Image (cartoon, grey):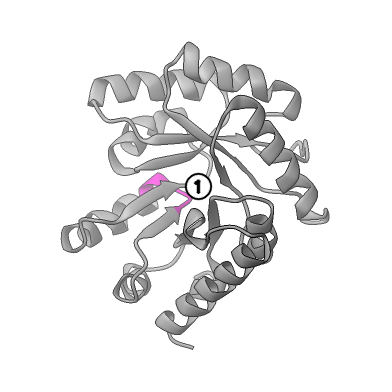
Amino acid sequence: MSAAARLADIRGRMEAAAAEAGRDAAACRLVAVSKTHPAEAIAKLIEAGQRVFGENRVQEAEGKFPALRERHADLELHLIGPLQTNKAREAVALFDVLQSVDRPKLAETLAKEMDRAGRRPACFVQVNTGEEPQKAGVLPADIDRFVAECRDVWRLPVVGLMCIPPVEDDPALHFALLAKFAARSGLARLSMGMSADFDIAIRCGATEVRVGTALFGARG
């Protein structure tokens, strides 16, 4: 299946899920997860009309997207993987959205880098809804306080929440929990759902879904 055909299939499934939930399909955006895939594969999706991409690592994105942006100035790039504080400066310079803000030290460092650079990428707070010890993210008990600190102490442009549910759990339970936390904090955007469950996420209110394998095939 061609890149254009895979993209059309995913968009069709997104529209169907939105219709089933009584939502406007335009209210949910597709973030094409291009991590580990070469610039040539990304270019094929760009040619098919995709403009929003997600990368896990700053260094990998730095190797691919500056050249792509020279040809396509309207690309939007999201960081969806863990961010080390020593990469905050590069992340602020390169990405339009940072989806993995998850600890005070990172929030403080990002705030300083945004002030220094005069550039303010939108931020999502990552929530560890399953309280998994090996996974990044703010614990549910701490989310309200952390969001408030991001806004009031560090003045970060927090727009939403992100989660990655445990693989063995019903994702709908975690998506509903994330939506509850977002509503409580007055946040409008929810980044949730991947290749295996993005339709469920849309029915639960996702505004961004992160789809990689279903668009690109197996990771390189």
Residue 161: x and y in percent read 58, 37
What residue is shown at x 33% (from left), y 34% (from top)?
Answer: 92
Q: Which residues are magenta?
A: 55-59
| Residue 216 among those drawn in magenta | no
90 to 71, vertically: above or below: above
What residue is shown at x 54% (from left), y 75% (from top)?
Answer: 12
Of 23 and 12, nearer the camera is 23
What residue is shown at x 64% (from left), y 16% (from top)?
Answer: 145
Name the quadrant containing residue 42: bottom left
Q: Amino acid at mark 1?
A: Ile
56 to 186, vertically: above or below: below
Q: In the rendered image, which residue does mark 1 sit on?
A: 80
**Which residue is most to the top?**
153
Residue 200: x and y in percent read 70, 60
Q: Is residue 195 visible?
A: no
Residue 107: x and y in percent read 48, 23
What residue is shown at x 45% (from left), y 28% (from top)?
Answer: 85
The answer to whether 76 appears left or right of 23 in the picture is left
The answer to whether 72 appears left or right of 90 in the picture is left
Report crowding for label 1: few under 14, some 14 to 19, many 20 or more residues within 10 A (C-alpha): many
66 to 180, vertically: above or below: below
| Residue 57 among those drawn in magenta | yes
**Which residue is most to the bottom?**
1
